[in-house]
Amino acid sequence: MKELAIYCLVYNMVRTVTTAAGLRQKVSPERISFIDALAMGFCGRSPGASLMDLVVNPLRPNRYEPRAIKDLQDTYRKLTRPRNEMRNHPELTER
């Protein structure tokens, strides 16, 4: 239970750092790199020190990846055509 509590605490602290960086850098907090915020928030930084600019992930609108795999497992649809073709035409995927 202690480990889970610490995990939740650290996660919320990192999200606080991403929110502060997002407001300061004038971007959505979801675009701030979680790993970068984790490194900046807890490694070699004294409490109360100002944050440096964090990595802003690029916008990728309309990103869609079909959930299919190339191997022969029966749990997912089979990747029977090129990925770009299946991405543009989801009806081509078979069940």
Image (spheres, grey):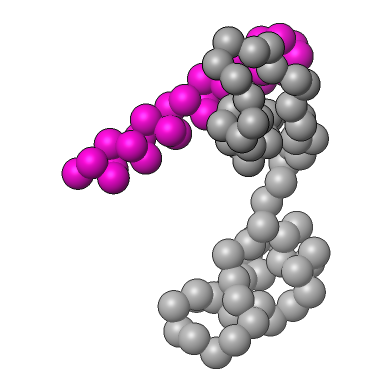
- How many numbered dots are placed on residues in this image? 0
Is most of the magenta stretch helix, strand or loop?
helix
At which x and y percent is residue 40? 65, 30
User: Which segment is the magenta one?
Assistant: 1-28
- Residue found at the very far left of the displayed protein: 1
Quadrant assignment, res 51: top right
Which of 50 and 24 lies nearest the eye of the viewer? Answer: 50
Q: Is residue 4 magenta?
A: yes
Residue at 19% over, 44% down: 1
Q: Is residue 62 left or right of residue 69?
A: right
At which x and y percent is residue 92? 66, 70
Which of 81 and 5 lies nearest the eye of the viewer? Answer: 5
Q: Is residue 84 above or below residue 42?
A: below
Quadrant assignment, res 50: top right
At which x and y percent is residue 52? 75, 20
Which of 39 and 93 lies nearest the eye of the viewer? Answer: 39
At which x and y percent is residue 87? 72, 60
Q: Is residue 23 magenta?
A: yes
The answer to whether residue 18 is seen in the rendering is no
Residue at 49% over, 86% down: 73
Q: Is residue 6 left or right of residue 12?
A: left
Residue at 59% over, 71% down: 68
Residue at 75% over, 69% down: 83
- Residue found at the very far bottom of the displayed protein: 72
Q: Is residue 30 above or below residue 26?
A: below
Q: Is residue 80 above or below residue 44?
A: below
The answer to whether residue 5 is seen in the rendering is yes
Quadrant assignment, res 41: top right
